[in-house]
Image: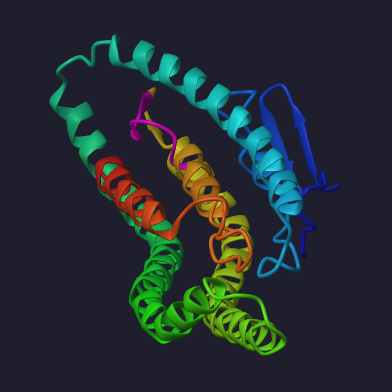
């Protein structure tokens, strides 16, 4: 079933910290945190990200800001729950420790299923960023002589010939930019759309990882689901990064740093 993002899905219901998805009962750690509910409140990828106006970009950012607030509240609640768990002592019991060790291995096998879905998407995102970094140098070199000529013409007295040539140069510079931006923007759009689809498939895996317990001891140190949603949010901030008019809400170079932070978080979250 394909979900339309930004709307509440009819097969998703919550009661007393429980979620029913297609008839399957899933246990929630935090009644305020619901992976699918938050995921499905993400705005859909706009049809025009290449030449959208600053106003359109700002409206999209406002929608993401609501997601950010939801995630922050859930993350703070999760930190408090984790603090309480950390303060509880685990009795040294060889049999119990063996059970926890076995469960840890099983948890890691499930986590491998999670990374099998998320890592290719993240790697593709990095590849798009690298394409941008390499291509922007070529674009600058391509437009450099045109820009020099344009600056020279602007310093000269106005004439019909000069005005026509300036218009030609401006159109060519814009055309070169548009061609380059369009290719990268299209790749980015497709990857973001795939992210929304693939993260929906993660629901069952996330529930298993976040609620995997042995004799009351929780295997996961933190919420995998919240980490996934936070990573998705960071990716969605780059929806307009290759917009030819506004140059994006986040510069691609800043985005590289964010991606590096994301990989660092993933490595820390992996036990």
Question: In the image, what residue occupies the spot 69% across and 52% down?
Answer: 57
Residue 163 higher or lower than 251, as above or below: below
What secondary structure predominates along the stretch shown in magenta? loop
- Residue 133, position in %: x, y? 35, 71
Q: Quadrant of residue 52?
A: bottom right
Residue 25 visible in the current orientation: no
Q: Nearer the viewer, residue 111 or 41?
A: 41
Q: Nearer the viewer, residue 256 or 75?
A: 256
Q: Which residues are magenta?
A: 217-224
Q: Quadrant of residue 15?
A: top right
Q: Quadrant of residue 144?
A: bottom left
Residue 141 higher or lower than 98, as above or below: below
- Residue 216, position in %: x, y? 39, 22
- Residue 27, position in %: x, y? 60, 33
Q: Is residue 251 left or right of residue 236?
A: left
Asked if the stretch drawn in magenta spans residue 221, the answer is yes
What quarter of the picture does the N terminus occupy? bottom right
Seen as rendered, the residue at the extreme front is 157
Question: In the image, what residue occupies the spot 66% across and 70% down?
Answer: 50
Question: In the image, what residue occupies the spot 52% across and 81% down?
Answer: 180
Question: In the image, what residue occupies the spot 55% across and 60% down?
Answer: 247
Q: What colour scheme was applied to this rendering of the protein?
A: rainbow
Asked if the stretch drawn in magenta spans residue 41, the answer is no
Residue 178 higher or lower than 222, as above or below: below
What quarter of the picture does the C terminus occupy? top left
Q: Nearer the viewer, residue 116 or 158?
A: 158
Residue 227 visible in the current orientation: yes
- Residue 197, position in %: x, y? 63, 63
């Amino acid at each position: 079933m394909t979900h339309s993002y930004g709307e509440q899905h009819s097969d998703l219901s919550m009661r007393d910290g429980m979620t029913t998805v297609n008839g399957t009962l899933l246990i929630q750690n935090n009644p305020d945190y619901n992976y699918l509910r938050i995921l499905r409140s993400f705005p859909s990828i706009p049809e025009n990200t290449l030449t959208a106006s600053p106003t359109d970009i700002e409206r999209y950012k406002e929608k993401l800001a609501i997601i950010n607030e939801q995630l922050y509240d859930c993350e703070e609640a999760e930190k408090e729950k984790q603090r309480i768990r950390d303060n509880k002592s685990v009795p040294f019991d060889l049999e119990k420790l063996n059970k926890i060790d076995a469960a840890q291995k099983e948890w890691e096998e499930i986590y491998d299923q999670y990374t099998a879905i998320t890592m290719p998407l993240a790697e593709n995102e990095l590849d798009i960023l690298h394409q941008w970094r390499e291509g922007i140098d070529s674009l600058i070199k391509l437009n450099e002589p045109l820009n020099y000529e344009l600056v020279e013409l602007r310093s000269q007295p106005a004439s019909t010939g000069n005005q026509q040539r300036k218009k030609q140069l401006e159109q060519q510079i814009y055309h070169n930019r548009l061609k380059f931006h369009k290719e990268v923007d299209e790749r980015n759009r497709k990857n973001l759309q795939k992210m929304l689809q693939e993260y929906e498939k993660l629901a069952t895996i996330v529930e298993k990882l976040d609620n995997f317990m042995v004799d009351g001891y929780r295997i996961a140190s933190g919420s995998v689901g919240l980490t996934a949603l936070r990573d998705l949010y960071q990716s969605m901030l780059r929806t307009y990064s290759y917009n030819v008019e506004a140059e994006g809400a986040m510069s691609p170079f800043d985005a590289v740093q964010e991606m590096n932070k994301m990989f660092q978080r993933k490595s820390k979250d992996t036990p």
